[in-house]
Image (cartoon, rainbow, N blue to C red):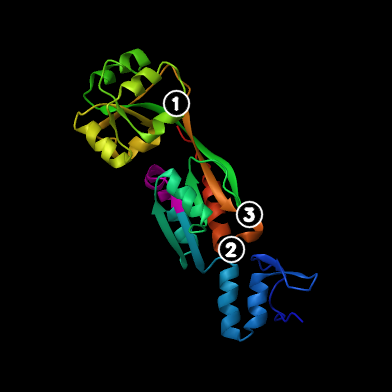
Amino acid sequence: KLWLPRHIKPSVSGIRCQRPGSNIEITLIAELINRFPVPEHVAAIEGLARAEQGHVRLIATPSVVQVVLPPILRRFMAQHPDVCIDLRDADSLTVEDDLRNERADIGLATIGPVAGYQRRKFLSDAFGVVCPVQHPLTTHATCSWTELSAHPFIANGLCGQIEDTEFQPILNAATLTVHNTGSLLNLVQAGVGVTILPRLAVLPQSADLAFVPITTTPASRDVYLFTPQPNLQTPATKAMVTAILDAEFQGF
């Protein structure tokens, strides 16, 4: 028999499950209250149900962490001050690996579908040339592949997302490939060469760098939000997902 205090509302949310040998579907929050009916335990469990307490593991690419998440986290932490957030930044492949191995609850990255997670497009971020602010390419509002080909080019892991045939000779001619975005931007700042990145990746260090749109390509990076299936989200995770979706970040 499932015991619930009379003051517990039926709307108390949580992960839904089914007891072995039973056709009754209950929430794990209700199951916890049934197992620990002592008043102080009930109060703590109700706190979990209202997302007043709990833990959320969030992983995203560095540019998303630095540019997109700060206002979202400020609002979330003000509304849910007792929810603990474990936030890590990593490249998209690491995000995918952590999701597959259940080391994260929510992910934001440029990757394909991951089994067990809902995937929805969160933002699109256009590619452009990144160079020092005093570089000759900054004298024009936009840049063409022909103009770019006249300058030393540093390749990076995101270049593979650009399928324009005119860009391939530039990519093939690159003698330096840098996979870490921070190191890549430092090399660009130092005048080693120019590169191509989504605009978001440049904003955190934009004071010394310029972003020049490319006129001849519609290429962009799509960032996807990965969340557990709704019936497998804890209240705290569900509250974070809502906060992220409510942000309605449109990209650039």
Q: Nearer the viewer, mark 3 or mark 2?
A: 3
Alpha carbon separation for disc pair 2 and 1: 38 Å
Q: Earlier in the sequence, mark 2 or mark 1?
A: 1
Q: Nearer the viewer, mark 1 or mark 3?
A: 1
**Which residue sits at x=21%, y=29%?**
192
Residue position marked by numbered label 1 in the rendering: 162
Residue 87, position as x, y percentages in the image = 41, 56
Residue closest to the eye, 183 or 211: 183
Q: Residues within 10 Å of mark 2 (few under 14, many from 20)?
A: many
Q: Residues within 10 Å of mark 3 (few under 14, many from 20)?
A: few
Element on which disc 3 rests: loop
Q: Earlier in the sequence, mark 3 or mark 2?
A: 3
**Which residue sits at x=57%, y=52%?**
227
Above or below residue 109? Residue 84 is: below
Above or below residue 196? Residue 15 is: below
Q: Left or right of 236: which side holds 20?
A: right
Q: Amino acid at mark 2?
A: Thr
**From where the camera sits, is residue 144 visible?**
no
Residue position marked by numbered label 3 in the rendering: 229
Residue position marked by numbered label 2 in the rendering: 234
Q: Amino acid at mark 3?
A: Gln
